[in-house]
Image (cartoon, rainbow, N blue to C red):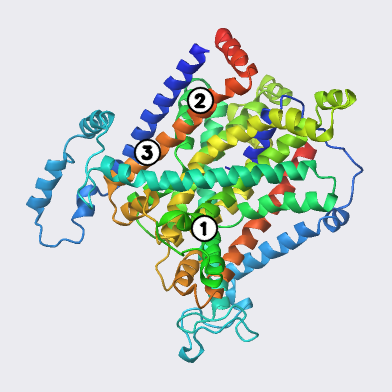
Amino acid sequence: MNELLVEDVARGAALGPAPELQPGPRTGVARFFLRRPGLVVSIVFVVLVALAAFWPGLFTNRDPLTGVPEDLFQAPSSAHWFGTDELGRDLFSRVVHGAHLSLKATLIAVAVAFVSGGLLGLLAGFVGGWLDDVLMRVIDVVLSIPALFLSLALVTALGYGTVKVAVAVGIASVASFARVMRAEVLRVRQSVFVEAARACGARWYSVLGRHVLPNALGPVLVLATLEFGLAILSVSSLSFLGYGAPPPAPEWGTLISGGRNYLANAWWLTALPGLTIVATVLATNRIARALDGEWVKQR
Amino acid sequence: MRRYVIRRLAQAIGVLWAAYTLSFLILVLLPGDAVSAMTAGDTELDQAQIDELRHRYGYDDPLPVQYLDHLGRALQGDFGDSASTGRTVTATLGDALPQTLLLTGTGLALGVLAGGSLALLATYTGLRWLRQLLLSLPPLAVSMPVFWVALMLVEIFSFRAGWFPAFGNDGLRGLVLPAVALAIPTGAMIAQVLSKSLFIALDQAYVETARAKGAGRRHIHLRHVLRNASLPALTVVGLLAGQLMANSVVIETVFSRNGLGRVTASAVTAQDLPLVQGVVVFGAAIFVLVNLVVDLIYPLLDPRIVVASSKGAAAA
Protein backbone atom coordinates (compact mmCIF):
# COMPACT_ATOMS: atom_id res chain seq x y z
CA MET A 1 0.00 0.00 0.00
CA ASN A 2 1.70 3.23 -1.04
CA GLU A 3 1.05 6.58 -2.60
CA LEU A 4 1.64 5.45 -6.17
CA LEU A 5 -1.11 2.95 -5.68
CA VAL A 6 -3.40 5.57 -4.19
CA GLU A 7 -2.84 7.64 -7.30
CA ASP A 8 -3.58 4.72 -9.62
CA VAL A 9 -6.68 3.69 -7.76
CA ALA A 10 -8.03 7.22 -7.60
CA ARG A 11 -7.45 7.83 -11.29
CA GLY A 12 -8.43 4.36 -12.45
CA ALA A 13 -12.05 4.44 -11.47
CA ALA A 14 -12.73 8.10 -12.16
CA LEU A 15 -13.37 7.18 -15.80
CA GLY A 16 -12.00 10.44 -17.02
CA PRO A 17 -8.72 11.95 -18.12
CA ALA A 18 -6.42 13.10 -15.36
CA PRO A 19 -6.21 16.89 -15.04
CA GLU A 20 -3.34 18.23 -17.10
CA LEU A 21 -0.47 19.79 -15.24
CA GLN A 22 0.25 23.35 -16.26
CA PRO A 23 3.63 23.29 -18.00
CA GLY A 24 4.61 26.60 -16.37
CA PRO A 25 7.76 28.61 -17.04
CA ARG A 26 11.12 27.01 -16.44
CA THR A 27 12.31 27.99 -13.04
CA GLY A 28 15.82 27.86 -11.67
CA VAL A 29 16.92 25.32 -9.09
CA ALA A 30 17.11 27.94 -6.36
CA ARG A 31 13.57 29.11 -6.99
CA PHE A 32 12.34 25.56 -7.11
CA PHE A 33 13.62 24.91 -3.61
CA LEU A 34 12.70 28.35 -2.25
CA ARG A 35 9.08 27.68 -3.13
CA ARG A 36 9.19 24.36 -1.27
CA PRO A 37 10.53 25.02 2.22
CA GLY A 38 9.11 21.70 3.42
CA LEU A 39 11.18 19.85 0.86
CA VAL A 40 14.36 21.67 1.93
CA VAL A 41 13.73 20.83 5.59
CA SER A 42 13.10 17.20 4.60
CA ILE A 43 16.35 16.95 2.65
CA VAL A 44 18.33 18.55 5.48
CA PHE A 45 16.76 16.17 7.99
CA VAL A 46 17.49 13.07 5.91
CA VAL A 47 21.10 14.21 5.45
CA LEU A 48 21.42 14.69 9.22
CA VAL A 49 20.01 11.20 9.87
CA ALA A 50 22.41 9.72 7.32
CA LEU A 51 25.33 11.56 8.97
CA ALA A 52 24.22 10.24 12.35
CA ALA A 53 24.16 6.73 10.97
CA PHE A 54 27.76 6.88 9.76
CA TRP A 55 29.41 9.33 12.18
CA PRO A 56 27.33 9.46 15.38
CA GLY A 57 30.29 11.25 17.01
CA LEU A 58 29.31 14.40 15.11
CA PHE A 59 26.17 14.80 17.22
CA THR A 60 26.97 13.39 20.62
CA ASN A 61 29.99 12.25 22.55
CA ARG A 62 28.05 10.31 25.16
CA ASP A 63 28.25 6.52 25.19
CA PRO A 64 24.89 4.97 24.21
CA LEU A 65 25.55 1.77 26.17
CA THR A 66 26.91 2.85 29.55
CA GLY A 67 24.68 4.83 31.90
CA VAL A 68 25.26 7.07 34.87
CA PRO A 69 23.24 5.46 37.70
CA GLU A 70 22.66 8.79 39.49
CA ASP A 71 21.01 10.24 36.37
CA LEU A 72 18.28 7.69 35.74
CA PHE A 73 14.82 8.79 34.51
CA GLN A 74 15.78 12.43 33.97
CA ALA A 75 13.23 14.37 31.93
CA PRO A 76 14.48 16.11 28.78
CA SER A 77 16.66 19.10 29.66
CA SER A 78 19.57 21.03 28.23
CA ALA A 79 22.00 18.45 29.65
CA HIS A 80 20.09 15.48 28.25
CA TRP A 81 18.09 16.62 25.24
CA PHE A 82 15.93 13.51 25.10
CA GLY A 83 16.20 12.67 28.83
CA THR A 84 17.71 9.48 30.26
CA ASP A 85 16.43 5.92 30.55
CA GLU A 86 16.10 3.37 33.37
CA LEU A 87 19.89 2.85 33.53
CA GLY A 88 20.76 6.52 33.26
CA ARG A 89 21.82 6.23 29.62
CA ASP A 90 21.45 9.36 27.52
CA LEU A 91 18.45 8.81 25.19
CA PHE A 92 19.59 11.32 22.57
CA SER A 93 22.85 9.46 22.20
CA ARG A 94 20.95 6.17 21.91
CA VAL A 95 18.67 7.58 19.22
CA VAL A 96 21.66 8.99 17.30
CA HIS A 97 23.55 5.71 17.52
CA GLY A 98 20.32 3.84 16.75
CA ALA A 99 20.18 5.54 13.36
CA HIS A 100 23.01 3.23 12.30
CA LEU A 101 21.13 -0.05 12.81
CA SER A 102 17.77 1.33 11.69
CA LEU A 103 19.13 2.89 8.53
CA LYS A 104 21.25 -0.16 7.75
CA ALA A 105 18.19 -2.40 8.02
CA THR A 106 16.12 -0.03 5.90
CA LEU A 107 18.77 0.22 3.20
CA ILE A 108 19.16 -3.55 3.06
CA ALA A 109 15.39 -3.99 2.83
CA VAL A 110 15.03 -1.46 0.01
CA ALA A 111 18.07 -2.85 -1.81
CA VAL A 112 16.75 -6.42 -1.65
CA ALA A 113 13.34 -5.33 -2.92
CA PHE A 114 14.76 -3.02 -5.58
CA VAL A 115 17.32 -5.43 -7.04
CA SER A 116 15.30 -8.64 -6.98
CA GLY A 117 11.97 -6.98 -7.79
CA GLY A 118 13.59 -4.94 -10.54
CA LEU A 119 15.25 -7.98 -12.10
CA LEU A 120 12.06 -10.03 -11.97
CA GLY A 121 10.05 -7.21 -13.52
CA LEU A 122 12.68 -6.69 -16.19
CA LEU A 123 12.70 -10.38 -17.01
CA ALA A 124 8.91 -10.58 -17.15
CA GLY A 125 8.53 -7.44 -19.23
CA PHE A 126 11.44 -7.96 -21.61
CA VAL A 127 11.16 -11.68 -22.27
CA GLY A 128 7.36 -11.77 -22.17
CA GLY A 129 5.39 -14.85 -23.21
CA TRP A 130 4.82 -17.70 -20.77
CA LEU A 131 7.59 -16.49 -18.44
CA ASP A 132 5.73 -13.20 -18.02
CA ASP A 133 2.49 -15.05 -17.29
CA VAL A 134 4.06 -17.32 -14.70
CA LEU A 135 5.97 -14.54 -12.93
CA MET A 136 2.95 -12.26 -12.81
CA ARG A 137 0.69 -14.97 -11.37
CA VAL A 138 3.27 -15.65 -8.65
CA ILE A 139 3.47 -11.93 -7.92
CA ASP A 140 -0.32 -11.66 -7.65
CA VAL A 141 -0.23 -14.40 -5.04
CA VAL A 142 2.54 -12.75 -3.06
CA LEU A 143 0.59 -9.49 -3.10
CA SER A 144 -2.44 -11.25 -1.63
CA ILE A 145 -0.53 -12.21 1.51
CA PRO A 146 -0.37 -9.26 3.94
CA ALA A 147 3.23 -8.01 3.92
CA LEU A 148 3.72 -8.26 7.67
CA PHE A 149 2.56 -11.89 7.71
CA LEU A 150 4.98 -12.69 4.90
CA SER A 151 7.79 -10.96 6.82
CA LEU A 152 6.84 -12.86 9.97
CA ALA A 153 6.90 -16.19 8.10
CA LEU A 154 10.34 -15.32 6.76
CA VAL A 155 11.55 -14.26 10.21
CA THR A 156 10.33 -17.60 11.59
CA ALA A 157 12.34 -19.42 8.97
CA LEU A 158 15.43 -17.18 8.97
CA GLY A 159 15.71 -16.33 12.67
CA TYR A 160 16.15 -13.04 14.53
CA GLY A 161 18.53 -10.15 13.98
CA THR A 162 18.67 -6.79 12.24
CA VAL A 163 19.89 -8.11 8.89
CA LYS A 164 17.45 -11.02 8.83
CA VAL A 165 14.53 -8.71 9.65
CA ALA A 166 15.69 -6.39 6.89
CA VAL A 167 15.86 -9.20 4.36
CA ALA A 168 12.39 -10.39 5.42
CA VAL A 169 10.94 -6.89 4.96
CA GLY A 170 12.70 -6.57 1.61
CA ILE A 171 11.46 -9.88 0.25
CA ALA A 172 7.92 -9.02 1.33
CA SER A 173 7.97 -5.98 -0.96
CA VAL A 174 9.68 -7.56 -3.98
CA ALA A 175 6.30 -8.04 -5.65
CA SER A 176 5.35 -4.37 -5.88
CA PHE A 177 8.75 -3.49 -7.39
CA ALA A 178 8.46 -6.28 -9.94
CA ARG A 179 5.03 -5.02 -10.93
CA VAL A 180 6.07 -1.41 -11.49
CA MET A 181 9.26 -2.43 -13.29
CA ARG A 182 7.38 -4.76 -15.62
CA ALA A 183 4.77 -2.12 -16.44
CA GLU A 184 7.50 0.39 -17.29
CA VAL A 185 9.49 -2.08 -19.38
CA LEU A 186 6.36 -2.94 -21.34
CA ARG A 187 5.68 0.76 -21.92
CA VAL A 188 9.23 1.55 -23.03
CA ARG A 189 9.58 -1.59 -25.14
CA GLN A 190 6.78 -0.44 -27.41
CA SER A 191 8.24 2.99 -28.04
CA VAL A 192 9.56 4.04 -31.40
CA PHE A 193 13.18 4.45 -30.36
CA VAL A 194 13.39 0.85 -29.21
CA GLU A 195 11.97 -0.28 -32.51
CA ALA A 196 14.50 1.93 -34.27
CA ALA A 197 17.37 0.48 -32.25
CA ARG A 198 16.20 -3.01 -33.13
CA ALA A 199 15.90 -2.10 -36.77
CA CYS A 200 19.47 -0.78 -36.72
CA GLY A 201 20.58 -4.24 -35.69
CA ALA A 202 21.34 -3.58 -32.02
CA ARG A 203 21.79 -6.74 -29.96
CA TRP A 204 19.14 -7.55 -27.36
CA TYR A 205 21.50 -6.79 -24.48
CA SER A 206 22.35 -3.36 -25.80
CA VAL A 207 18.67 -2.60 -26.41
CA LEU A 208 18.02 -3.69 -22.86
CA GLY A 209 20.97 -1.93 -21.24
CA ARG A 210 21.07 1.32 -23.22
CA HIS A 211 17.47 1.95 -24.17
CA VAL A 212 14.93 0.05 -22.10
CA LEU A 213 16.53 0.03 -18.67
CA PRO A 214 17.48 3.72 -18.35
CA ASN A 215 14.05 4.82 -19.52
CA ALA A 216 12.13 2.38 -17.34
CA LEU A 217 14.04 3.06 -14.14
CA GLY A 218 12.41 6.37 -13.16
CA PRO A 219 9.19 5.17 -11.52
CA VAL A 220 11.02 2.29 -9.88
CA LEU A 221 13.39 4.76 -8.22
CA VAL A 222 10.41 6.81 -7.03
CA LEU A 223 8.92 3.63 -5.63
CA ALA A 224 12.24 2.95 -3.89
CA THR A 225 12.14 6.30 -2.09
CA LEU A 226 8.54 5.67 -1.06
CA GLU A 227 9.47 2.17 0.00
CA PHE A 228 12.20 3.67 2.16
CA GLY A 229 9.61 5.21 4.47
CA LEU A 230 7.51 2.04 4.50
CA ALA A 231 10.58 -0.07 5.23
CA ILE A 232 11.51 2.11 8.22
CA LEU A 233 8.01 1.50 9.58
CA SER A 234 8.05 -2.26 8.90
CA VAL A 235 11.55 -2.76 10.30
CA SER A 236 10.65 -0.82 13.43
CA SER A 237 7.41 -2.82 13.83
CA LEU A 238 9.31 -6.09 13.65
CA SER A 239 11.97 -4.92 16.06
CA PHE A 240 9.22 -3.60 18.35
CA LEU A 241 7.77 -7.13 18.36
CA GLY A 242 11.22 -8.27 19.47
CA TYR A 243 12.68 -9.87 16.33
CA GLY A 244 15.34 -7.24 15.62
CA ALA A 245 18.57 -6.36 17.32
CA PRO A 246 18.97 -7.87 20.83
CA PRO A 247 18.25 -5.42 23.69
CA PRO A 248 21.42 -3.52 24.66
CA ALA A 249 21.98 -2.37 21.07
CA PRO A 250 20.13 0.88 20.32
CA GLU A 251 17.65 0.53 17.45
CA TRP A 252 14.63 2.80 17.00
CA GLY A 253 11.94 0.13 17.27
CA THR A 254 13.71 -1.58 20.17
CA LEU A 255 14.08 1.76 21.97
CA ILE A 256 10.31 2.26 21.82
CA SER A 257 9.54 -1.24 23.03
CA GLY A 258 12.01 -0.71 25.89
CA GLY A 259 10.42 2.60 26.83
CA ARG A 260 7.00 0.97 26.81
CA ASN A 261 7.64 -0.50 30.27
CA TYR A 262 8.10 2.99 31.74
CA LEU A 263 5.25 4.64 29.85
CA ALA A 264 3.51 5.77 33.04
CA ASN A 265 6.46 7.67 34.53
CA ALA A 266 8.81 8.45 31.63
CA TRP A 267 6.88 9.46 28.51
CA TRP A 268 10.01 10.64 26.71
CA LEU A 269 11.39 7.10 26.40
CA THR A 270 8.59 6.18 23.95
CA ALA A 271 7.56 9.56 22.56
CA LEU A 272 10.91 10.89 21.37
CA PRO A 273 12.32 7.85 19.51
CA GLY A 274 8.86 7.53 17.93
CA LEU A 275 8.91 11.17 16.82
CA THR A 276 12.34 10.54 15.26
CA ILE A 277 10.83 7.71 13.20
CA VAL A 278 7.84 9.87 12.22
CA ALA A 279 10.10 12.74 11.14
CA THR A 280 12.33 10.45 9.08
CA VAL A 281 9.40 8.78 7.34
CA LEU A 282 7.69 12.13 6.67
CA ALA A 283 10.91 13.54 5.23
CA THR A 284 11.55 10.59 2.89
CA ASN A 285 7.91 10.60 1.77
CA ARG A 286 8.13 14.34 1.01
CA ILE A 287 11.26 13.74 -1.08
CA ALA A 288 9.57 10.85 -2.86
CA ARG A 289 6.62 13.09 -3.69
CA ALA A 290 8.92 15.74 -5.12
CA LEU A 291 10.72 13.15 -7.26
CA ASP A 292 7.42 11.72 -8.42
CA GLY A 293 6.03 15.15 -9.35
CA GLU A 294 9.11 16.16 -11.29
CA TRP A 295 9.22 12.88 -13.07
CA VAL A 296 5.61 13.23 -14.16
CA LYS A 297 6.29 16.72 -15.49
CA GLN A 298 9.35 15.51 -17.36
CA ARG A 299 7.32 12.86 -19.08
CA MET B 1 -23.22 -11.52 -14.41
CA ARG B 2 -23.00 -15.21 -13.56
CA ARG B 3 -19.87 -15.61 -15.64
CA TYR B 4 -18.29 -12.70 -13.81
CA VAL B 5 -19.03 -14.28 -10.42
CA ILE B 6 -17.71 -17.70 -11.48
CA ARG B 7 -14.53 -16.24 -12.88
CA ARG B 8 -13.85 -14.26 -9.70
CA LEU B 9 -14.51 -17.34 -7.54
CA ALA B 10 -12.12 -19.48 -9.58
CA GLN B 11 -9.47 -16.77 -9.31
CA ALA B 12 -9.89 -16.56 -5.55
CA ILE B 13 -9.50 -20.31 -5.13
CA GLY B 14 -6.42 -20.32 -7.34
CA VAL B 15 -4.81 -17.56 -5.29
CA LEU B 16 -5.53 -19.42 -2.05
CA TRP B 17 -3.97 -22.62 -3.33
CA ALA B 18 -0.91 -20.71 -4.49
CA ALA B 19 -0.62 -18.89 -1.16
CA TYR B 20 -0.67 -22.23 0.61
CA THR B 21 2.04 -23.58 -1.68
CA LEU B 22 4.16 -20.48 -1.30
CA SER B 23 4.04 -20.50 2.50
CA PHE B 24 4.79 -24.23 2.46
CA LEU B 25 7.85 -23.61 0.31
CA ILE B 26 9.10 -20.72 2.48
CA LEU B 27 8.78 -22.68 5.69
CA VAL B 28 9.93 -26.07 4.44
CA LEU B 29 12.76 -25.20 2.10
CA LEU B 30 14.52 -22.96 4.58
CA PRO B 31 16.82 -24.65 7.08
CA GLY B 32 15.27 -26.14 10.21
CA ASP B 33 11.87 -27.77 10.55
CA ALA B 34 9.17 -27.83 13.20
CA VAL B 35 10.82 -30.75 14.96
CA SER B 36 14.21 -29.10 15.33
CA ALA B 37 12.45 -25.97 16.62
CA MET B 38 10.44 -28.07 19.10
CA THR B 39 13.50 -29.86 20.41
CA ALA B 40 15.89 -26.90 20.29
CA GLY B 41 16.05 -26.40 24.05
CA ASP B 42 15.74 -30.07 24.88
CA THR B 43 19.11 -31.76 25.47
CA GLU B 44 17.74 -35.01 26.81
CA LEU B 45 16.50 -36.24 23.45
CA ASP B 46 18.98 -38.29 21.47
CA GLN B 47 19.16 -38.44 17.70
CA ALA B 48 17.03 -41.58 17.49
CA GLN B 49 14.19 -39.93 19.39
CA ILE B 50 14.39 -36.84 17.20
CA ASP B 51 14.23 -39.06 14.12
CA GLU B 52 11.27 -40.83 15.63
CA LEU B 53 9.51 -37.45 16.10
CA ARG B 54 10.38 -36.48 12.51
CA HIS B 55 8.87 -39.73 11.33
CA ARG B 56 5.73 -39.23 13.38
CA TYR B 57 5.12 -35.78 11.90
CA GLY B 58 6.08 -36.93 8.42
CA TYR B 59 9.10 -34.65 8.05
CA ASP B 60 11.26 -37.50 6.73
CA ASP B 61 9.10 -38.10 3.66
CA PRO B 62 10.22 -36.76 0.28
CA LEU B 63 9.07 -33.15 -0.23
CA PRO B 64 6.39 -33.78 -2.89
CA VAL B 65 4.83 -36.46 -0.66
CA GLN B 66 4.89 -34.09 2.33
CA TYR B 67 3.35 -31.35 0.21
CA LEU B 68 0.50 -33.44 -1.17
CA ASP B 69 -0.13 -34.94 2.25
CA HIS B 70 -0.33 -31.51 3.88
CA LEU B 71 -2.38 -30.03 1.08
CA GLY B 72 -4.87 -32.89 1.24
CA ARG B 73 -5.37 -32.37 4.95
CA ALA B 74 -5.49 -28.58 4.58
CA LEU B 75 -8.38 -29.00 2.15
CA GLN B 76 -10.26 -30.71 4.95
CA GLY B 77 -9.51 -27.79 7.27
CA ASP B 78 -6.67 -29.59 9.09
CA PHE B 79 -3.49 -27.51 9.20
CA GLY B 80 -1.72 -29.87 11.60
CA ASP B 81 -0.90 -29.39 15.26
CA SER B 82 0.84 -26.40 16.75
CA ALA B 83 4.41 -27.38 17.59
CA SER B 84 4.46 -25.28 20.76
CA THR B 85 1.05 -25.94 22.33
CA GLY B 86 0.02 -29.22 20.70
CA ARG B 87 -3.50 -27.94 19.94
CA THR B 88 -4.71 -28.06 16.36
CA VAL B 89 -3.90 -24.98 14.33
CA THR B 90 -7.50 -24.66 13.17
CA ALA B 91 -8.84 -24.60 16.75
CA THR B 92 -6.21 -22.10 17.89
CA LEU B 93 -7.03 -19.74 15.04
CA GLY B 94 -10.76 -20.27 15.46
CA ASP B 95 -10.60 -19.30 19.14
CA ALA B 96 -8.60 -16.18 18.42
CA LEU B 97 -10.68 -15.01 15.49
CA PRO B 98 -13.76 -13.39 17.16
CA GLN B 99 -11.69 -10.94 19.24
CA THR B 100 -9.65 -9.91 16.20
CA LEU B 101 -12.72 -9.57 14.00
CA LEU B 102 -14.33 -7.34 16.62
CA LEU B 103 -11.22 -5.18 16.80
CA THR B 104 -10.59 -4.92 13.06
CA GLY B 105 -14.29 -4.42 12.33
CA THR B 106 -14.56 -1.55 14.79
CA GLY B 107 -11.27 -0.11 13.57
CA LEU B 108 -12.41 -0.27 9.95
CA ALA B 109 -15.79 1.30 10.74
CA LEU B 110 -14.17 4.16 12.65
CA GLY B 111 -11.57 4.59 9.92
CA VAL B 112 -14.16 4.73 7.13
CA LEU B 113 -16.23 7.19 9.11
CA ALA B 114 -13.34 9.48 10.03
CA GLY B 115 -11.51 9.22 6.72
CA GLY B 116 -14.70 9.66 4.72
CA SER B 117 -15.86 12.73 6.59
CA LEU B 118 -12.39 14.25 6.44
CA ALA B 119 -12.27 13.82 2.67
CA LEU B 120 -15.80 15.15 2.23
CA LEU B 121 -15.16 18.18 4.40
CA ALA B 122 -11.81 18.92 2.74
CA THR B 123 -13.34 18.87 -0.73
CA TYR B 124 -16.51 20.71 0.29
CA THR B 125 -15.13 23.56 2.33
CA GLY B 126 -14.45 26.90 0.71
CA LEU B 127 -11.88 27.86 3.31
CA ARG B 128 -8.41 27.43 1.89
CA TRP B 129 -6.62 27.06 5.23
CA LEU B 130 -9.08 24.44 6.47
CA ARG B 131 -8.71 22.44 3.30
CA GLN B 132 -4.93 22.49 3.49
CA LEU B 133 -4.98 21.58 7.16
CA LEU B 134 -7.32 18.65 6.57
CA LEU B 135 -5.39 17.41 3.55
CA SER B 136 -2.11 17.50 5.45
CA LEU B 137 -3.40 15.16 8.16
CA PRO B 138 -3.52 11.84 6.26
CA PRO B 139 0.11 11.93 5.03
CA LEU B 140 1.14 12.63 8.62
CA ALA B 141 -0.96 9.75 9.92
CA VAL B 142 0.50 7.20 7.51
CA SER B 143 4.02 8.20 8.54
CA MET B 144 3.50 7.16 12.14
CA PRO B 145 4.36 3.64 13.34
CA VAL B 146 1.11 2.01 14.47
CA PHE B 147 2.55 0.68 17.71
CA TRP B 148 3.82 4.14 18.60
CA VAL B 149 0.41 5.71 17.98
CA ALA B 150 -1.10 3.05 20.22
CA LEU B 151 1.43 3.70 22.98
CA MET B 152 0.86 7.46 22.79
CA LEU B 153 -2.91 6.90 23.09
CA VAL B 154 -2.29 4.76 26.17
CA GLU B 155 0.01 7.41 27.63
CA ILE B 156 -2.49 10.21 27.12
CA PHE B 157 -5.90 8.59 27.61
CA SER B 158 -5.20 5.91 30.19
CA PHE B 159 -2.21 7.08 32.21
CA ARG B 160 -2.85 10.84 32.15
CA ALA B 161 -6.61 11.10 31.79
CA GLY B 162 -7.53 7.68 33.13
CA TRP B 163 -10.51 7.33 30.80
CA PHE B 164 -9.77 3.93 29.33
CA PRO B 165 -7.92 0.81 30.51
CA ALA B 166 -4.36 0.50 29.19
CA PHE B 167 -4.63 -3.18 28.31
CA GLY B 168 -6.89 -6.21 28.31
CA ASN B 169 -9.96 -7.52 26.55
CA ASP B 170 -12.66 -6.37 28.91
CA GLY B 171 -15.71 -4.78 27.39
CA LEU B 172 -16.33 -1.73 25.26
CA ARG B 173 -14.07 0.59 27.23
CA GLY B 174 -11.11 -1.68 26.55
CA LEU B 175 -11.94 -1.71 22.85
CA VAL B 176 -11.85 2.05 22.33
CA LEU B 177 -8.12 2.75 22.34
CA PRO B 178 -7.03 -0.22 20.19
CA ALA B 179 -9.81 0.47 17.71
CA VAL B 180 -8.83 4.15 17.46
CA ALA B 181 -5.17 3.19 16.99
CA LEU B 182 -6.22 0.83 14.20
CA ALA B 183 -8.56 3.41 12.66
CA ILE B 184 -5.91 6.13 12.30
CA PRO B 185 -3.80 4.59 9.48
CA THR B 186 -6.92 3.05 7.91
CA GLY B 187 -8.82 6.33 7.89
CA ALA B 188 -5.76 8.11 6.51
CA MET B 189 -5.56 5.78 3.51
CA ILE B 190 -9.28 6.12 2.83
CA ALA B 191 -9.13 9.90 3.17
CA GLN B 192 -6.23 10.12 0.74
CA VAL B 193 -7.91 8.05 -1.94
CA LEU B 194 -11.37 9.48 -1.46
CA SER B 195 -10.26 13.13 -1.48
CA LYS B 196 -8.23 12.53 -4.63
CA SER B 197 -11.10 10.87 -6.44
CA LEU B 198 -13.54 13.50 -5.16
CA PHE B 199 -11.36 16.23 -6.66
CA ILE B 200 -11.18 14.31 -9.94
CA ALA B 201 -14.95 13.76 -9.97
CA LEU B 202 -15.60 17.45 -9.26
CA ASP B 203 -13.87 18.28 -12.55
CA GLN B 204 -16.20 16.11 -14.62
CA ALA B 205 -18.70 17.52 -17.05
CA TYR B 206 -21.75 16.12 -15.27
CA VAL B 207 -21.00 18.36 -12.30
CA GLU B 208 -21.22 21.38 -14.54
CA THR B 209 -24.43 20.07 -16.08
CA ALA B 210 -25.99 19.59 -12.68
CA ARG B 211 -24.89 23.05 -11.63
CA ALA B 212 -26.30 24.56 -14.82
CA LYS B 213 -29.60 22.90 -14.04
CA GLY B 214 -29.61 24.75 -10.75
CA ALA B 215 -28.78 21.98 -8.29
CA GLY B 216 -27.42 23.12 -4.94
CA ARG B 217 -23.80 22.68 -4.03
CA ARG B 218 -24.45 20.21 -1.23
CA HIS B 219 -26.81 18.19 -3.41
CA ILE B 220 -24.20 17.91 -6.17
CA HIS B 221 -21.48 17.00 -3.68
CA LEU B 222 -23.38 14.24 -1.94
CA ARG B 223 -25.56 12.88 -4.73
CA HIS B 224 -23.41 13.13 -7.83
CA VAL B 225 -19.79 13.49 -6.86
CA LEU B 226 -19.63 11.23 -3.82
CA ARG B 227 -21.43 8.40 -5.58
CA ASN B 228 -19.01 8.48 -8.47
CA ALA B 229 -15.95 8.92 -6.30
CA SER B 230 -16.75 6.20 -3.80
CA LEU B 231 -15.72 3.27 -6.01
CA PRO B 232 -11.95 3.83 -5.65
CA ALA B 233 -12.46 4.12 -1.90
CA LEU B 234 -14.21 0.76 -1.96
CA THR B 235 -11.21 -0.78 -3.73
CA VAL B 236 -9.02 0.61 -0.99
CA VAL B 237 -11.18 -0.93 1.70
CA GLY B 238 -10.53 -4.29 0.04
CA LEU B 239 -6.80 -3.68 -0.09
CA LEU B 240 -6.81 -2.42 3.49
CA ALA B 241 -8.04 -5.79 4.78
CA GLY B 242 -4.47 -7.06 4.73
CA GLN B 243 -3.09 -3.97 6.39
CA LEU B 244 -5.76 -4.10 9.09
CA MET B 245 -4.85 -7.65 10.02
CA ALA B 246 -1.14 -6.84 10.01
CA ASN B 247 -1.70 -3.81 12.22
CA SER B 248 -3.88 -5.82 14.58
CA VAL B 249 -0.89 -8.12 15.24
CA VAL B 250 1.06 -5.13 16.51
CA ILE B 251 -1.83 -3.50 18.33
CA GLU B 252 -2.91 -6.65 20.13
CA THR B 253 0.66 -6.96 21.35
CA VAL B 254 0.66 -3.37 22.63
CA PHE B 255 -2.65 -3.74 24.46
CA SER B 256 -2.04 -7.37 25.53
CA ARG B 257 -5.34 -8.37 23.93
CA ASN B 258 -6.09 -11.95 23.04
CA GLY B 259 -6.59 -12.55 19.37
CA LEU B 260 -5.04 -13.56 16.10
CA GLY B 261 -2.20 -11.07 16.52
CA ARG B 262 -1.09 -12.46 19.85
CA VAL B 263 -1.26 -15.99 18.44
CA THR B 264 0.89 -14.89 15.49
CA ALA B 265 3.48 -13.11 17.60
CA SER B 266 3.90 -16.02 19.99
CA ALA B 267 3.97 -18.52 17.11
CA VAL B 268 6.86 -16.63 15.52
CA THR B 269 8.67 -16.36 18.84
CA ALA B 270 8.30 -20.10 19.42
CA GLN B 271 9.24 -20.85 15.77
CA ASP B 272 6.02 -22.80 15.54
CA LEU B 273 6.06 -23.54 11.80
CA PRO B 274 2.62 -25.19 11.41
CA LEU B 275 0.91 -22.34 13.28
CA VAL B 276 2.79 -19.66 11.32
CA GLN B 277 1.80 -21.32 8.07
CA GLY B 278 -1.78 -21.48 9.28
CA VAL B 279 -1.71 -17.77 10.05
CA VAL B 280 -0.23 -16.85 6.66
CA VAL B 281 -2.77 -18.92 4.74
CA PHE B 282 -5.56 -17.63 6.93
CA GLY B 283 -4.43 -14.03 6.39
CA ALA B 284 -4.39 -14.59 2.64
CA ALA B 285 -7.82 -16.23 2.86
CA ILE B 286 -9.37 -13.24 4.63
CA PHE B 287 -7.72 -10.86 2.19
CA VAL B 288 -8.97 -12.84 -0.80
CA LEU B 289 -12.44 -13.16 0.71
CA VAL B 290 -12.79 -9.44 1.43
CA ASN B 291 -11.61 -8.56 -2.06
CA LEU B 292 -13.99 -11.10 -3.54
CA VAL B 293 -16.86 -9.47 -1.68
CA VAL B 294 -15.72 -6.02 -2.82
CA ASP B 295 -15.55 -7.22 -6.42
CA LEU B 296 -19.01 -8.72 -6.17
CA ILE B 297 -20.44 -5.52 -4.69
CA TYR B 298 -18.97 -3.44 -7.51
CA PRO B 299 -21.49 -4.40 -10.20
CA LEU B 300 -24.33 -3.52 -7.86
CA LEU B 301 -22.94 -0.02 -7.46
CA ASP B 302 -21.68 0.47 -10.98
CA PRO B 303 -23.27 -1.57 -13.80
CA ARG B 304 -20.58 -0.40 -16.22
CA ILE B 305 -18.10 -2.85 -14.66
CA VAL B 306 -19.97 -6.01 -15.65
CA VAL B 307 -20.43 -4.71 -19.17
CA ALA B 308 -16.72 -3.95 -19.46
CA SER B 309 -15.63 -7.30 -18.03
CA SER B 310 -17.96 -9.39 -20.19
CA LYS B 311 -16.78 -7.46 -23.25
CA GLY B 312 -13.22 -8.27 -22.22
CA ALA B 313 -14.11 -11.94 -21.83
CA ALA B 314 -15.73 -12.04 -25.24
CA ALA B 315 -12.69 -10.46 -26.85
CA ALA B 316 -10.24 -12.82 -25.14
Residue closest to the eye, B244 or A107: B244
Residue B208 in which image quadrant = top right
Residue A178 seen anywhere in this rendered image of the structure? no
Residue closest to the eye, B115 or B23: B115
Say which residue label 1 marks: B177
Residue type at tag 2: Asp
Q: Residue at x 55, y 43 (%)?
A: B109
**Image quarter of the N terminus of chain A:** top right
Q: Residue at x 27, y 32 (%)?
A: B77
> Gap between marks 2 and 3, in whole Å?
28 Å
Q: Is residue A49 left or right of residue B255?
A: right
Residue type at tag 1: Leu
What secondary structure is found at the residue carrying circle 3?
Answer: helix
What secondary structure is found at the residue carrying circle 2?
Answer: helix
Q: Residue at x 81, y 23 (%)?
A: B206
Q: Position of residue B3 (x, y in %)?
A: 49, 12
Instruction: Pinpoint the chain carrying mark 2.
Output: A
Residue B282: give its label. Answer: 3
Graded by Cα atoms within 10 Å as few (under 14), some (14 to 19) or many (20 or more), the crowding at tag 1 reads: many
Graded by Cα atoms within 10 Å as few (under 14), some (14 to 19) or many (20 or more), the crowding at tag 3 reads: some
Say which residue label 2 marks: A132
Q: Position of residue A281 (x, y in %)?
A: 62, 57
**Image quarter of the C terminus of chain A:** top right
Residue B138 seen anywhere in this rendered image of the structure? yes
